[in-house]
Image: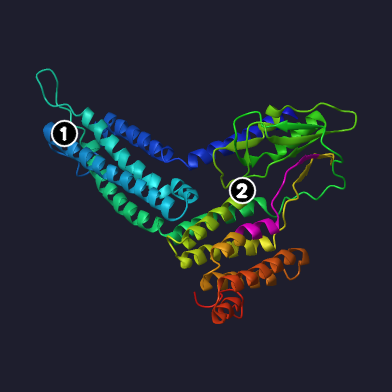
Amino acid sequence: MAVSTRNTKRYLWIGSVREVLSNSLWFVPLLLIVGYGILAQAIVAFDGALENWVPYSFTGGATSAQDLLSTIAAAILSMSTLVLSVTIVALQLASQQFSPRVMRTFFRDRGTKVAIGMLLGTFVYSILVLRAVVPRSDSLDQFVPSVAISVGFALTLVSLGVFIFYVNHVAHAIRVVHIIESVAIETRATIGHLIGAGTVPDPATLPGGPPDVVLGNPQRPGMVTGIDNAGLVALARQHRCCIGVVPYVGDFVPFGAPLARVWFDPGHEDAPSAEQVRDHIALSRERTMGQDVAFGFRQLVDIAEKALSPGINDPTTAVQALDQIHDLLRRLAVAEYPTGYYVDEPGALRAMRPTHRWEDYLDLGLTEIRQYGAGSVQVQRRLSAVLADLSLATADAPLRAVPVDEHRKLLDRSIIAGLADPHDRALALIPDEQGLGGGPH
């Protein structure tokens, strides 16, 4: 069982490292820079053998080669500086105009990383080839790696194409519809991983009474970004106990705050240490989308709230965010949720974790937008349409229909309080026939 615990711990660590690398702007460019450097060294080393195989290779002397490579290096460096400047401006714009949380969509954008890496890689390639050029002297013969110089010229032309691609890519990337769709796509992927098949049925019995041990967070504070269910089951079985994780994924856990509760099996009092439990609960400085569906909703709601703020006053952007929230809620309305209970092979309950339910996502996705958009007919009408459609989606699930009806009542009161004109109220309260579009907006 100890082997299984180590394996699942390693899996959680690998997931954390993958998330860090995906959110970094340096990893992909560094790989490309190293690759371009290796390419330069390889071509220079075999330049003589390749010269007969490469048509239209460079035929100038050492001085011409040095001038050409110096010009390429200077031009590519200037272009790279401009690309980095545009990237920083785009990040600042996204943070101020939409939400600081959506900056991660730029950090994870592969197009930007590849463009930066190819430009800087071409610069490194030119410098390394320039270093290999040897002018004729009394003690040295002239060496001009003609194939490497020709490849450098070709990479320069490719870099120009990359620069044009990057300008077009950034122009589209800072559009709010692109940002909203990126967040929604990632959220849908997370829903697909966490919701549905693979859920564990509720056990017949749950731990009774208060826990025997409460374990606090033994390390630095942070956001819960992932919980290793299999690792906790293996650890609990090893110590003959049941481990109940206290925080939700996405919650902030201060140092010393309750991290897990432990119930002993009858006749056993061997509790795991706080450090052992902490090894199977990933904490980070900020939330991620790995296991946190609610974080996707939070980003979309933040975009809508920012658009509805008095300084921006852009209800159409709020409706665009609400469209994606509608799609996500529609998927969750009919989804099978994980129970949060995990058993070992004999069937004994070994681990528990809190999980968000239908009403939690409904509250998160609609409440704040309803409050911020109380004075907008466009937003209130779209909310009416969303709730009308969710009522249809939950018609065969009475327990899920109840919170939808509660939100319908809250929206009715919000419309009455926020819209003084009877015509505006009627317009906001009446969705279209399908309950999908909510009329013109």
Q: Residues within 10 Å of mark 1 (few under 14, many from 20)?
A: many
User: Does the magenta run of residues contain 343?
Assistant: no
Residue 257 picture location, percent across and down? 68, 34
Q: Could you say whether the residue bearing mark 1 is in a helix, strand or loop?
A: helix
Residue 318 picture location, percent across and down? 50, 64
Residue bearing the label numbered 2: 292
Q: Quadrant of residue 116?
A: top left
User: Does the magenta run of residues contain 354?
Assistant: yes
199 vs 313, left or right, is: right
Q: Tell me what residue is drawn at x 47 percent, y 64 percent.
A: 317
Residue bearing the label numbered 1: 66
Q: Residues within 10 Å of mark 2 (few under 14, many from 20)?
A: many
Q: Tell me what residue is drawn at x 51 percent, y 60 percent.
A: 304
Q: Which residues are magenta?
A: 350-365
* Quadrant the N terminus occupies: top right
For the residues marked 2 and 1, what is the alpha-carbon distance in whole angstroms? 54 Å
Residue 438 picture location, percent across and down? 56, 75
